[in-house]
Amino acid sequence: MTAARPGGRTARNTRAIFDALFAELVERGHGGLTMEAIATRAGVHKSTLYRRWPTTDLLLAAALAEHPRNDWTPDRSGELIKDLVGVGRAVLDGLDDPVIGPISRACMAAAFGSEPAAAALTAFLDDQNRRAAIVVTDAIERGDLPPDTDPTALIERLVAPLYYRRLILHRPVPPEALTAAARAALRPAEGVSRSG
Amino acid sequence: MTAARPGGRTARNTRAIFDALFAELVERGHGGLTMEAIATRAGVHKSTLYRRWPTTDLLLAAALAEHPRNDWTPDRSGELIKDLVGVGRAVLDGLDDPVIGPISRACMAAAFGSEPAAAALTAFLDDQNRRAAIVVTDAIERGDLPPDTDPTALIERLVAPLYYRRLILHRPVPPEALTAAARAALRPAEGVSRSG
């Protein structure tokens, strides 16, 4: 056995396999995923896939590390409510995006049936929420929020009703619901400020 | 062709097929569903299933009308915050239940890939939220909430963070998070009261 060289054949194959997986997801969705189709599209042998990832859900969990949103950062206008609405809009736009949407939905579907997929999804969403939380940290530094505000908890309060409405209830989220979510997410933090 | 008699062979077959589907979901999850296994377990021919429901997701959508939680009603103690925590606890207990949990999760997974399954899930959850909303209506009638409170919207605010944490982030929901969700769900209604 030879060690994998960074940027070498193994890295190129992995990139091709993840790209093929994402393309298959966009075309066929999570229910239509097969190792056969991914291998053919990536130009590798099926056994190469099975050796590294015994199921499509394990492959999906590994590919989340290459999710197109991994380097996302929020817009920072210097106005908290505007920034929070921007974070919420980015979440919703991602779910409705013709490429990112099917990938995200497939990861959520896989997570219901696979613990490694669920763990990968949790890590991915935690990272996204931490990235978004910089708009809350900005507001704390400006003195617009109390210093003991938990930035990630505030972001979770913001996005929870958006995910619930869009991915569990399968309803659109109108702009006024997004603004309401941003205002509601702020309230416990304001409560801390008033009682402190 | 003979018409289906209510309570006759067609109704008995349908009941057996839905029971077999639920049992397969509990044993194998959404990813392991096959028409073959459901038909064998139900004691009907596979073609009987395919004729009525061309895919397992369409069968799942039809079976949601027989979900074990369809006749659920919330506990009504006469104390709003206690009743809301009870509704939230019922949602979480359902998701963790060894029978109801796999059925619910399978419906959510199916809804990501199938519009009829998504529509059936929306109808099911809307009905559950309307059933829960009676504890809000009780509070309005007691004068504990303003008369213009939207009972179903309040229940959606209560359950959104629970579903997000449990089904999207795949984290447990500790009792203090449940109480916090109940208190947060009340705030916009209290805001209406104060400004009214």
Image (cartoon, coloured by chain):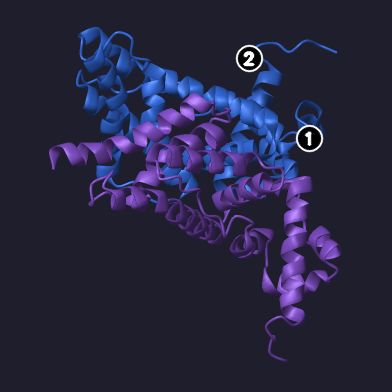
Chain colours: A blue, B purple
At horizontal 49% and vertical 46% (from top left) the residue drawn is A168
Q: Amino acid at mark 2?
A: Gly
Q: Position of residue B22 (x, y in %)?
A: 72, 55
Report which quarter residue B193 is drawn in: top left
Give the structural element (helix, strand or loop) at label 1.
loop
Work out whether residue B71 or residue B41 is closer to the camera in this orientation and state it. Answer: B71
> Which residue does the numbered mark 2 point to in the structure image?
A7
How far apart are labels 1 and 2 at the CA level? 20 Å
Work out whether residue A141 or residue B127 is closer to the camera in this orientation and state it. Answer: B127
Looking at the image, residue A127 sits to the left or right of residue B30; the answer is left
Q: Amino acid at mark 1?
A: His
Give the structural element (helix, strand or loop) at label 2.
loop
Residue A109's label in the rendered image is none
> Which residue does the numbered mark 1 point to in the structure image?
A45
Q: Position of residue B116 (x, y in %)?
A: 54, 62
At horizontal 65% and vertical 44% (from top left) the residue drawn is B101
The number of discs equals 2
Q: Position of residue B39 (x, y in %)?
A: 81, 65
**Image quadrant in which the C terminus of chain A is located:** top left
Residues tagged by mark 1 and mark 2 found on one chain of the structure = yes
Q: Which of pointers 1 and 2 lies earlier in the amino acid sequence?
A: 2
Report which quarter residue A59 is drawn in: top right
Work out whether residue B166 or residue B192 is closer to the camera in this orientation and state it. Answer: B192
